[in-house]
Image (cartoon, rainbow, N blue to C red):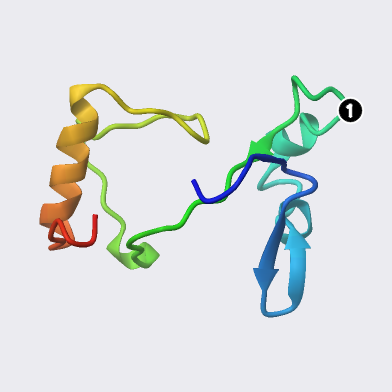
Amino acid sequence: MIGERCRADQYHFDTEEGSKTLLELASREEYHQLYHQIGDDEEEAEFLVPVRWLYTVGRDQAFSEVGLFGNQNTVCKPTTPKWSHTVERLKQVWRLNDERT
């Protein structure tokens, strides 16, 4: 993480068109659940956390297979053996060395 959590309706992304919130960037259909949970209740609201990606790929290079770690939470502390397996597998697939990770 490179910053504190922020409510989804208040977090701003830098875009070519300027600073925009997630809700300005996405349609209601794409983020129906997010819109549903944005009310005034802090316990029910969605939050975003800024991260610095060390490596990214295009959608055409997306990778998935049975046995990879998955979690629907925005932020988690992976401690299962599947997490280590996933990291090693992605390093193989995308030919990454430990200097980048």
Residue 72's x, y, as percent? 48, 30
Q: Is residue 43 left or right of residue 57?
A: right
Residue closest to the eye, 59 or 72? 72
Residue at x 72%, y 43% (from the top left corner): 8
Residue closest to the eye, 66 or 92? 92
Extreme residue toward the right, this view: 40
Is residue 29 depicted above or below 58 in this figure?
A: above
Q: Dividing the picture into quarters, in which one does residue 96 lie?
A: bottom left
Residue at x 52%, y 35% (from the top left corner): 74
- State how many labels appear: 1
Q: Is residue 35 left or right of residue 76?
A: right
Element at badge 1?
A: loop
Is residue 64 depicted above or below 69 in this figure?
A: below
Q: Is residue 16 left or right of residue 28?
A: left
Type of amino acid at the residue the image marks with label 1:
Asp
Residue at x 76%, y 47% (from the top left corner): 28
Q: Is residue 80 left or right of residue 89?
A: right
Extreme residue toward the bottom, this view: 16
Q: Which residue position is annotated with label 1?
A: 40
